[in-house]
Image: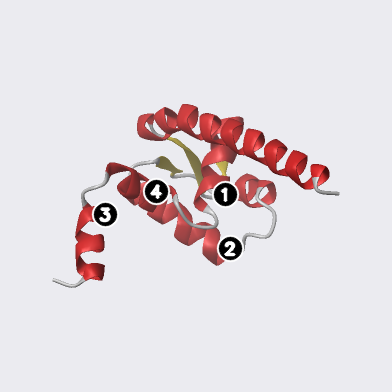
Amino acid sequence: MDDRALYKSSLDNCPLTFALNLIGGKWRLPIIWALSKNGTMRYNELKRSIYGITNMMLTQTLKELELNGIINRKQFMEVPPRVEYSLTNNGENLIPALKALANWGNEMKQVTVSQELSQL
């Protein structure tokens, strides 16, 4: 077995790698974060709240997050049709970990800025 195969097989069993594969990607975290801040949102509300996302990417990412059990999609049978998105319990359980990661990121950013200033 070569080194790459060994590395890949050891990561396959890592719960952190599994979790990051579920929420990783350019648009997944901004969608999760928008839903956590705003609660239930409609498609166009989500689109307006996430700068730079295209319709295709928003639709694709919402489908992936729904398949992964992170968001709910509720369709109302009315005219015009209405669809609402919200976090599932699994998605809600993710928010404290994301807040902790954001706090860590802020701390690291401050350390980096301090180090850069001290080198001037």
| Residue depicted at x 63% and y 50% | 44
What colouring method underlies this structural image? secondary structure
Q: Earlier in the sequence, mark 2 or mark 1?
A: 1
Disc 1 is placed on an element classified as helix
Disc 3 is placed on an element classified as helix
Asked if marks 4 and 3 touch (Cβ < 8 Å), the reply is no
Q: Tell me the distance, in whole angstroms, between the alpha carbons under discs 3 and 2.
A: 33 Å
> x, y percentage for residue 94?
43, 33
Disc 1 crowd, CA 10 A, few/some/many (<14, 14-19, 20+): some
> x, y percentage for residue 88?
39, 34
Which kind of residue does numbered mark 2 sit on? Asn
Q: Which mark is residue 43?
A: 1
* Residue 40 appears in the rendering: no
Q: Earlier in the sequence, mark 3 or mark 1?
A: 3
Q: Earlier in the sequence, mark 4 or mark 3?
A: 3
Q: Which mark is residue 20?
A: 4
**For the residues carrying marks 4 and 2, which lies nearer the camera in this image?**
4
> x, y percentage for residue 11?
26, 54
Asked if marks 3 and 1 touch (Cβ < 8 Å), the reply is no
Which kind of residue does numbered mark 1 sit on? Tyr
| Residue depicted at x 52% and y 46% | 29
Residue tagged 2: 55
Disc 4 is placed on an element classified as helix
**For the residues carrying marks 4 and 3, which lies nearer the camera in this image?**
3
Disc 4 crowd, CA 10 A, few/some/many (<14, 14-19, 20+): few
In depth, the one of 43 and 81 nearer the eye is 43
Which kind of residue does numbered mark 4 sit on? Leu
Residue tagged 3: 11
Q: Tell me the distance, in whole angstroms, between the alpha carbons under discs 4 and 1.
A: 24 Å
